[in-house]
Amino acid sequence: MTPCHDSPSSVLIIGAGWAGLSAAVTLAQQKIPVTVLEAALHPGGRARGLEMNGVRVDNGQHLLIGAYEATLAMLHTLGMDERKALLRMPLDLTMRSPRQEGINLASLYLPAPLNLAFGLLRTSGIPWPERFAALVGLARLMRWHSPQDLPVTTLLRHHKIPTRLIEGIFNPLCLAALNTHPDMASGQLFATVLQASFSQRRRHSDLLIPRLDLSAMFVDPARRFIEQQGGRLLTRARVRALDYQAERGYRVVLDDGEFSAPQVILATPAHITQSLCAGLPALQTWATKLKHLDDEPICTVYLRYPEKTRMTPTFIGMLETTGQWLFDRRLTGTPGVMAVVISASGAHLHLDNSALIKQIKAELSLFYPDWPEPLDAFVIREKRATFRASVGCERFRPSHQMPLPGLWLAGDYIQTGLPGTLEGAVLSGLQCAKSIVNSKNS
Ligand SMILES: Cc1cc2nc3c(=O)[nH]c(=O)nc-3n(C[C@H](O)[C@H](O)[C@H](O)COP(=O)(O)OP(=O)(O)OC[C@H]3O[C@@H](n4cnc5c(N)ncnc54)[C@H](O)[C@@H]3O)c2cc1C
């Protein structure tokens, strides 16, 4: 690859995850020339479809909620019909335990927050006095704001949420939403997620399950859109270094060439961004802040059963087991394929893949004793699935505006007010695109 000097108005985007792609789509829509450089063979980053053992899966089972307004608007921009891309259903959590009665929390068809309030009152598996206590506690939690962060466990106890509900509903929700154990997870972020889901519109608490793999749902349409608008997305284009000169702008160095542009969006994960910024003296102090953001893994165990194997409901929460959530991928076009999600760190990380599969198979046979032996099983481990949303982490999350002109930051870890999610990634890309458009118009 030879040196490539992009036009003075162009924007280079490093990283084609959902953050980089959202920025590129928004800029391309405004007729601003974009070039996206992606290190991997396929775009999509931490949310993409792939083929394993001849089965189409995702790098990890994803779930969206109705409050993901930026993501839904982005799908609309790409011409995706929401009903074809996602199954939307009112919140309905079936939490099952192999040892005791499970819990079911289903929201009702009422305006928020009554949908949750009455849903809570109807929660099965919880004695009536505890349901009332939970209702009072949750009503206070919905209004809770504090400059002082505290662990989710403390927050829930402080609001007198009954232990059975904490263990059966809120701890699993915290793990799913923040990918961090409740005893260290940020109460502020958890309260924000609850408030965004339950205190505004009823549809915000809906669950949205992908009907397509994540590349077919978003990544491929985003790439098509960018290219149709005259932009470029180059894969196998790993950026090795970045430098800046006031008169020339940014020089982006790859293994076999370089690019230059006046504006660059760094849409790489935090640890990569940190190392790319190491070559820019003006950013060295700034970049050390990112060191304080830790990562948490997510492990997905896929099991392929005969096609007629199915479960109702489409997904369940698993209590007191290594597996935390179980999804029937029939909905995603692969009948018989089940995905078991294990968020955050835990003892399972010490098991190799075959031991983990054995453990998960044994757990599933407790819930579904009639299922036959799976025909195949494999594990996808994402070691850096999201940043650890621990108490006080907000102060280490950077803004999308960097201390150098024309350099922007996108990614689920920047200051969006959300945990590491698809919606956070999309919002971060939109923030960058909006600032660039504004800077060009001013
Ligand atoms: C298993 C799993 C399950 C999840 N479940 C959910 C869920 O249910 N709901 C939800 O909302 N969120 C979920 N998430 C989180 C969500 O996937 C992420 O928040 C989101 O995908 C992050 O997107 P991003 O663009 O910020 O980062 P990334 O996806 O990491 O994108 C960064 C891109 O930069 C590229 N790159 C890195 N280095 C370079 C370089 N030097 N040069 C060029 N390119 C480079 C990478 O290859 C990558 O494509 C899950 C994540 C995982 C891993």
Image: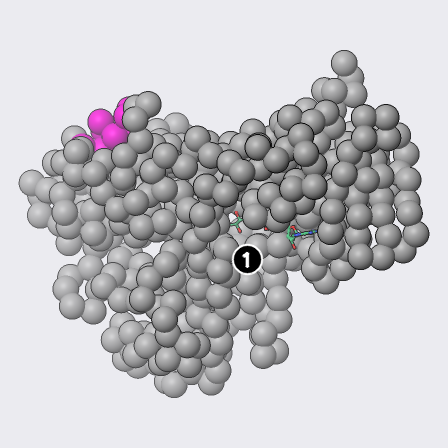
Say which residue appears at 91% left-offset and 40% top-offset.
5
Please, is residue 365 above or below residue 212 in the view?
Answer: below
Q: Residue at x 73, y 51 (%)?
A: 240
Mark 1 = which residue?
A: 211
Is residue 321 something that shows in the picture?
yes
Residue that appears at 76% across and 14% down: 442
**Mark 1: amino acid:** Arg
Above or below residue 382? Residue 222 is above
Pick out the residue farthest to the front: 281
Pick out the residue farthest to the top: 442
Q: Is residue 197 visible?
A: no
How far from the left and from the top, in percent, is residue 321?
27, 66
Which span is picked out in magenta? 137-144
Viewer-closest of 301 and 182: 182
Q: Is residue 167 magenta?
A: no
Return the residue nearer the eye: 85 or 422: 422
Dominant secondary-structure state across the stretch colored magenta: helix
Of 419 and 104, the residue lying toward us: 419
| Label 1 lies in ligand 1 vicinity (Cβ under 8 Å) | no
Q: Quadrant of residue 178?
A: top left
x and y percentages locating residue 176 in the rendered image: 38, 51
In the picture, measured across the screen, residue 169 lies left or right of residue 330, that is: left
Residue 138 in the magenta stretch? The answer is yes
The image shows residue 209 at horizontal and vertical percentages of: 48, 53
The N terminus, quarter of image: bottom right
Residue 329 is situated, as x and y percent measured from the top left of the image, at: 48, 66
Q: Residue at x 36, y 49 (%)?
A: 180
Q: Nearer the viewer, residue 115 or 358?
A: 358
| Display coloring | one colour
Which element type, helix, strand or loop, lies under badge 1?
Answer: loop
